Amino acid sequence: MANRIVIDPVTRIEGHLRIEAALDSENTITEAYSAGTMVRGIENILKKRDPREAWAFAQRICGVCTTVHAIASIRAVEDALGIKIPKAANIMRNMIIAQQFIHDHVMHFYILHALDFVDVVSALEADPGKTSEIQQSISTWPNSSPAYFAEVQQKVKAIVDSGQLSLFSHGYWGHPAYKLPPELNLLGVAHYLECLDWQSRVTKIHTIFGGKNPHPNFVVGGVPLPIDMNSDQALNAEKLAVIADSIKRMNDFIDQVYLPDLLAIAPYYLEYASLGEGLGNFLSWGEFPEGNLNDLDRLIFPRGVILNRDLKQVITPDPRDAVKMKEFVTHSWYKYRQGDEAGLFPWEGETVFNYTGPKPPYEFLKVEGKYSWLKSPRWNELPMEVGPLARVLILYTTGHEETVKLTNSVLEALKAPLPAVFSTLGRTAARAIETKVIGGLLEKFYDELVAEIKASRTETFNSEKWNPGSWPKKAMGFGYTEAPRGALGHWVVIENKKIKNYQVVVPTTWNASPRDHKNQPGAYEASLVGTRLARPEQPLEILRTIHSFDPCLACAVHLIDARGQVVGEVGTGFNLVFKSD
Ligand code: NFE
Ligand code: MG
């Protein structure tokens, strides 16, 4: 019988993910299984609370995609209660969302994904003079001298010589699937270290508009910051200047570091332009509403569904369509009153635990039954990929000029045909492309905000429905956002001024979902099939494709087992490899 390998925990992600893969005699993956191994219970915690405070709990689902659950939550409550927000507040929210995207995508590329392609130990063999030449040939980034790269190399050498690799422990250094020359490895490590500093300087929009980062403050009806050029307590000229500087730092790093690095590294890994595709089905709820409405039809990133790789047609999905939008638990550790084959629309959704999983420490997942804490969201009973690739393909297909141009120029630079987008590399490139697009949008939003201020339209909060006495007896709402990892929806039911039901359907729940009632695999599971491993005991190739989705299991399960149940060996083990008999 074929070998089965287990990676648990998958590292350089957020949260607790287990991947099991069955290999044929050539070490090619024939089946893969994705399991979320941690559970909390945020959806249940929200019940019976005041809907106006739900955002503060929901935002704690995750500290990586900070803001996104707060945004989806306030939008859901505003949708239920019919609250319109002032235009300046909408622009400020768009800026909060845009900053989150840029911060999160750059950090993912360097801190979570780059070391799948950049061999840290090989950087010690680099000629710093040659790295300097490469840097100066790809961009005008000022940190480019031979002395600078020699200094970075010394830092890495000190870490390696200490015998304690610290943050670089447990990497598969020296693995034959690493292809970059030492000089590019040194470049990648330098930018890994640089972005740690950069990230602390690009959170100003959150800290000013919401008081802190991560987890800024929000408010149903607007944003919790007034605009007043004559007040220290409000958005004023001085704070606008700090924000303008922060936006410039973001865009400089995108233009001079992130995009050039992607184009310098990708040519060495072009086999990933035809590996790791996954489903070929994509979904986005859309983002960046223009104007002053919570208006799903006026989004800069449109809502859309693409099926079967068909880039001629974008279907517009309706998140309120109870027939098409459902979550299944056939292979998830939950039970539904209606039976575990049923699919539930989120307004009728249920969160009741039913753990039947493996006992510690050395059992395989029982994949014919339940095997994950993630539910399986499905659109029209089909599994969907969400995230940067979904958004970029929808923008591309609907003719968004800058996205078309950027996508074509990346394909041209890599001499890759259009279908190459359906791949691990396509996903990673799409993340960079949309970061560039959003960097431009951030400048546009800033100019719009300044124009509103100049026109004295400075209202940032609508108090009209703040009094619960004005609410209907029962109300239901949908709150969308595009989180960095993909389509995020919060569905709320309000009854007698309290939350009656609350369901969160999260990007990583879509992408990392287990099989469903029809035994259809989720996006991670599908993406791994067909990939061959050079060394099954060091499954670097699996990490590359899984990391290309940027997993966040805290979001996906939004639920900790009170007993702290161990379902795999955590700690020194980067992966556990079992052979089945
Ligand atoms: Ni915790 Fe999240 C994002 C959300 S992912 S990272 O982006 O929602 O599933
Ligand atoms: Mg949920």
Image (spheres, rainbow, N blue to C red):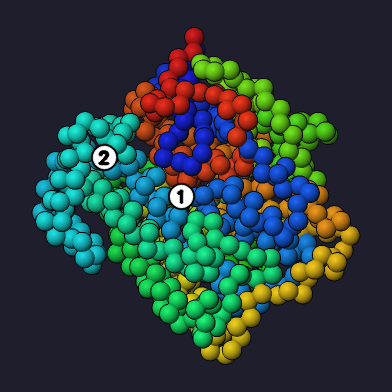
Going by the image, does 433 lie left or right of 95? left
Residue under label 1: 427
Category of crowding for the residue at label 1, using alpha-carbon neighbours closer than 10 angstroms: few (below 14), some (14–19), many (at least 20) = many
Residue at the image point whose x is 66% and y is 44% from the top = 42
- In the picture shown, does residue 355 fall above or below 65? above
Depth check, mark 2 against mark 1: the one in front is: 2
Q: In front here: 175 or 457?
A: 457
Residue at the image point whose x is 28% and y is 51% from the top = 193
Q: In front here: 200 or 412?
A: 200
Mark 1: amino acid: Arg
- In the picture shown, does residue 580 fall above or below 18? above
Q: Position of residue 466 (x, y in %)?
A: 76, 69
Residue at the image point whose x is 40% and y is 64% from the top = 202
Q: Which mark is residue 119?
A: 2
Q: Position of residue 172 (x, y in %)?
A: 31, 32
- In the picture shown, does residue 405 fall above or below 70? below
Q: Position of residue 474 (x, y in %)?
A: 87, 58
Q: CA distance from mark 2 to mark 1?
A: 21 Å
Residue reaching furthest right? Answer: 473
Q: Position of residue 151 (x, y in %)?
A: 15, 51
For residue 154, what is the image quadrant? Answer: top left
Camera sees residue 376? no
Q: Which mark is residue 453?
A: none
Of labels 2 and 1, earlier in sequence is 2
Going by the image, does 529 lie left or right of 269? right
Mark 2: amino acid: Asp
The secondary element bearing badge 2 is classed as: loop
Camera sees residue 303? yes
Residue at the image point whose x is 41% and y is 70% from the top = 247
Category of crowding for the residue at label 2, using alpha-carbon neighbours closer than 10 angstroms: few (below 14), some (14–19), many (at least 20) = many
Going by the image, does 560 lie left or right of 439? right
